[in-house]
Amino acid sequence: EKGGYDYFMLKEIAEQPKAVADTLLGRIDAAGSLTLDEVRIGAAELRELDKVVIVACGTAFHAGLIAKYAIEHWTRLPCEVELASEFRYRDPILDPRSLVVAISQSGETMDTLMALRHAREQGSKVLAICNTNGSTIPRESDAVLYTHAGPEVAVASTKAFLTQLVACYLVALYLGQVRGTKWGDEIRAVIRDLSRISGAVERVLETMEPVRALARSLAGKKTVLFLGRHVGYPVALEGALKLKELAYMHAEGFAAGELKHGPIALIEEDLPVVVVVPSPRGRSVLHDKIVSNIQEIRARGARTIVIAEEGDDAVVPYADHLIRIPVTPTLLQPLVSTVPLQVFACELATARGNEVDQPRNLAKSVTVE
Ligand code: M6R
């Protein structure tokens, strides 16, 4: 049932192009508009919203952090993202004009379920993004957008994460489409790019051998740091979470702009630091700032592992290891930049002799608070 792979995780990583394509299937019409009939919250009500609040845990929370950039950019609606376990205990401000989006692969995570119950008690509508048909979270929500990743068996989430991102982009673009924003042309262009993105995920998977070799060479390390900016920041958090779960290593993700506010003190000789570089097109100012960050940490001895777009030559002089990803629109980059981090963590776990599919102390779905 592992389809020839040694671990479910490897199989699930390989299934990502299909999972992404399946999650888009039937949701983009021939004219290039989104048809999300499943979002049974009427257009009038969606136009009345004054904020979006995302609740989730772990990897799903990282998908939510990325969704915030997309939702705020394409809809101009304020979007908060909150760990489900913190949410209801701080008396959050919610009313019928707040749309609460609960993201969960399993649909059974107790913290997320309790958060959505709390939101509904305040009169907010809840939209679930979920991978498991008929599970508790979608049953208790007002509407559900299913991710079509297929069953995810490995405890460490991979294909579910990519499909959660796709679902979040769909929600953001749909809200933009229904509410109408000045980004109409960009929204249409991004819908087109999204419809082709599974090919880019496929291309990343074809180039992962050097990432595996690099991971094996780092098996004796104690710490790996991850840096990113903009949507690359949650990707850094996700890369660090994968490494903790699978390799049992100390791994931390930071916003690259925070380096000089503290984390740079951690840099020492030969410390591996993975840097997720934003596209040099689009928000190029961020790109240039992160290139300076790479220079700064390398000058202090870090071993830089740089994930950058094909054709981005500015990073070459400062990268001890360079991992190339296909060119994508800025907001969609996490769909390709996360993949090498999954492969990296999986290979490091294997090299350290860890149980890949069933890491110690963890359960696939956390049904207690
Ligand atoms: O089933 P859920 O998406 O609600 O699960 C949330 C987290 O428990 C989950 O993403 C966890 O962080 C994974 N093990 C990450 O790989």
Image (cartoon, helix red, strand yellow):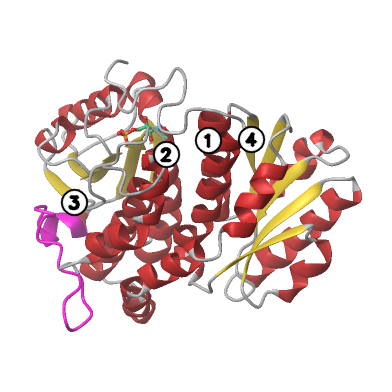
Report if the CB atoms under discs 3 and 2 are less than 8 Å apart: no
Tell me the chief SS of the magenta region. loop
First-in-chain label (1 vs 4): 1
* Residue where numbered disc 2 is placed: 59
Report if the CB atoms under discs 3 and 1 are less than 8 Å apart: no
Quadrant location of ligand 1? Answer: top left
First-in-chain label (4 vs 3): 3
Q: Residue at x 19, y 38 (%)?
A: 124
The answer to whether residue 94 shows anywhere in this view is yes
Query: What residue type is disc 4 on?
Result: Glu
Report if the CB atoms under discs 2 and 1 are less than 8 Å apart: yes
* Residue where numbered disc 4 is placed: 252
Question: Which callout, 3 or 2, points to the residue nearer the camera?
Answer: 2
Establish whether ligand 1 lies closer than 8 Å to the Cβ of label 2. yes
* Residue where numbered disc 3 is placed: 145
Q: Residue at x 53, y 35 (%)?
A: 241
Residue 241's label in the rendered image is 1
Q: Secondary structure at mark 4?
A: strand
Establish whether ligand 1 lies closer than 8 Å to the Cβ of label 1. yes
The quadrant of the rendering that contains the C terminus is top left
Q: Residue at x 34, y 23 (%)?
A: 91
**Disc 1: CA contacts within 10 A as few (<14), some (14-19) or many (>=20):** many
First-in-chain label (3 vs 2): 2
